[in-house]
Image: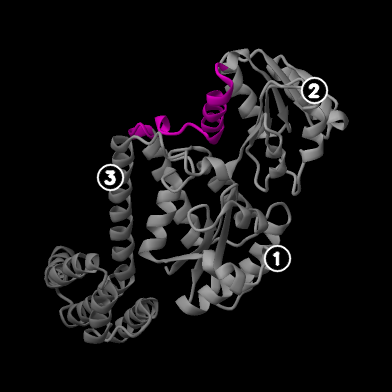
């Protein structure tokens, strides 16, 4: 397995760049299809969230794999490779495994510990399976990452560090507005993030929530679910005029709340207005802050604030889980790499025993069944004892990351060939052929 990660995230790029390279919908299956047919890519998975795009790939060669994946990622995002390169990060093999597990635990998220990434990773895996772009390597690795993520949330208090980006944004809004139970809120959008924002506002005591959405039926549905009311999206300025807090979280690819709309809403008004933009690409025109009574909180604003509530003990607890899981996975993986050679060695030895036993028994026809069984057991015990030390030791030595060199030495010493599976097949054939001759 040679797993490669090529990605761009909030850790390496500013929000404006993430907005420019955001991909969704049909673009993801198209990217998976292109990756699947790339010369040096055997499997591929694309993880996209509001603050990251990552390609996980099983590649045949490192440098060629990086070139293939980077070029196709740039093409999918409408960017030039040279433009994207300063913001890309690359992880390979052990580091790739550690990065994926860290992502699944929520340690790499903008809001440390947020659990939404598990659902997003699961969705990415489902899409890749639908597009037939994942196989044994990435399928097993993602399944393990999901288990690690669940363990991190169940065995530690990481959930308390940052429940969601919505909570952090509303905390910041409350600094300007005071107790949110007294505010009139407008939710722009009716998707999952909007529903989460509405539910979080309700938990904080807000009883006046209005929903505006391009599709009126969806606004009506969400408003009914939360006991709020729907507003006409076509007259957004009027809806904003009646609000103290506007939370926008649509899936649009362009500006939804324009500066002139907010300007009309603020006409003749002195009380403050806070706009919370949770969308990527952004929903709200940054120019809205030209009005003195308007405050804008967006993902760029939150980036520095989101880590302010981190609890060092909880973070450290998750890191311990992560280190244990990564070490366990890499140990299993390294042992697996020498396993075919060990199997081939034992298959060859078993073949030799079978052939020699057949020859011996052919020369001793007077042995009864009990005696024949004793002879067979004795020969097999000798071989097992001779091979036990080398096979156990090669698995132990594989843990230092050099398992392939030890496996190679075994293949050379015992003439197993370059492909252990071929050695197993040859052993089986020789048993059949030579055994027949001995009889």
Instruction: Tell me where residue 74 appears, x and y as whole percent.
Output: 63, 68
Residue that mark 1 sits on: 78
Q: Nearer the viewer, mark 3 or mark 1?
A: 1
Q: Earlier in the sequence, mark 2 or mark 3?
A: 2
Q: Earlier in the sequence, mark 1 or mark 2?
A: 1
Cβ–Cβ under 8 Å for marks 1 and 2: no
Secondary structure, mark 2, is loop
| C-alpha separation, residue under disc 2 versus residue under disc 3 | 56 Å
Residue that mark 3 sits on: 320
Indicate which disc residue 304 carries. none
Residue that mark 2 sits on: 268
Q: Earlier in the sequence, mark 3 or mark 1?
A: 1
The stretch in magenta equals 154-179
Q: Nearer the viewer, residue 140 or 254?
A: 254
Judged left or right of residue 186, residue 107 is: left
Secondary structure, mark 3, is helix
Q: Nearer the viewer, mark 2 or mark 3?
A: 2
Judged left or right of residue 198, residue 404 is: left
In the figure, residue 128 lies in which quadrant?
Answer: bottom right
Visible in this render: residue 330?
A: yes
């Amino acid at each position: 397995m040679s797993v490669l990660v090529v990605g761009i995230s909030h850790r390496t790029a500013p929000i404006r760049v993430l907005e420019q390279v955001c991909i969704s919908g049909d673009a993801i299956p198209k990217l998976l299809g292109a990756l699947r047919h790339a010369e040096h890519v055997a499997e591929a998975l694309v993880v996209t969230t509001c603050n990251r795009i990552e390609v996980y790939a099983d590649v045949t060669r490192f440098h060629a794999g990086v070139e293939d994946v980077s070029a196709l990622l740039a093409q999918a995002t409408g960017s030039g490779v040279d433009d994207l390169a300063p913001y890309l990060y690359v992880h390979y093999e052990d580091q790739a495994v550690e990065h994926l597990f860290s992502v699944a635990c929520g340690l790499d998220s903008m809001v440390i510990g947020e659990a939404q990434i598990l659902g997003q990773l699961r969705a990415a895996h489902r899409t890749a399976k639908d597009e037939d772009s994942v196989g044994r390597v990435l399928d097993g690795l993602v399944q393990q990452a999901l288990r690690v993520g669940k363990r991190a949330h169940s065995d530690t208090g990481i959930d308390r560090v940052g429940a969601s980006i919505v909570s952090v944004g509303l905390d910041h809004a409350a600094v300007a507005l005071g107790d949110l139970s007294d505010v009139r809120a407008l939710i722009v959008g009716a998707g999952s993030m909007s529903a989460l924002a509405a539910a979080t506002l309700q938990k904080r005591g807000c009883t006046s929530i209005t929903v505006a959405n391009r599709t009126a039926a969806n606004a009506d549905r969400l408003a009914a679910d939360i006991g709020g009311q729907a507003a006409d999206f076509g007259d957004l300025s009027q809806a904003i005029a009646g609000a103290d807090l506007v939370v926008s979280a649509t899936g649009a690819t362009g500006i939804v709340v324009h500066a002139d709309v907010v300007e009309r809403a603020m006409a003749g008004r002195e009380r403050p207005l806070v706009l919370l933009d949770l969308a990527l690409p952004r929903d709200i025109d940054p120019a809205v802050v030209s009005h003195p009574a308007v405050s804008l909180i967006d993902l760029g604003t939150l980036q520095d604030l989101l880590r302010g509530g981190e609890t060092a003990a909880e973070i450290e607890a998750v890191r311990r889980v992560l280190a244990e899981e990564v070490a366990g996975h890499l140990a299993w993986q390294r042992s697996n790499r020498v396993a075919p050679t060990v199997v081939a060695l034992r298959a060859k030895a078993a073949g030799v025993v079978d052939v020699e036993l057949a020859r011996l028994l052919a020369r001793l026809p007077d042995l009864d069944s009990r005696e024949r069984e004793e002879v067979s057991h004795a020969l097999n015990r000798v071989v097992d004892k001779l091979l036990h030390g080398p096979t156990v030791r090669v698995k132990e030595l594989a843990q230092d990351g050099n398992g392939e060199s030890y496996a190679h030495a075994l293949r050379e010493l015992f003439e197993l060939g370059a492909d252990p599976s071929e050695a197993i097949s040859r052993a089986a054939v020789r048993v059949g052929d030579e055994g027949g001759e001995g009889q």
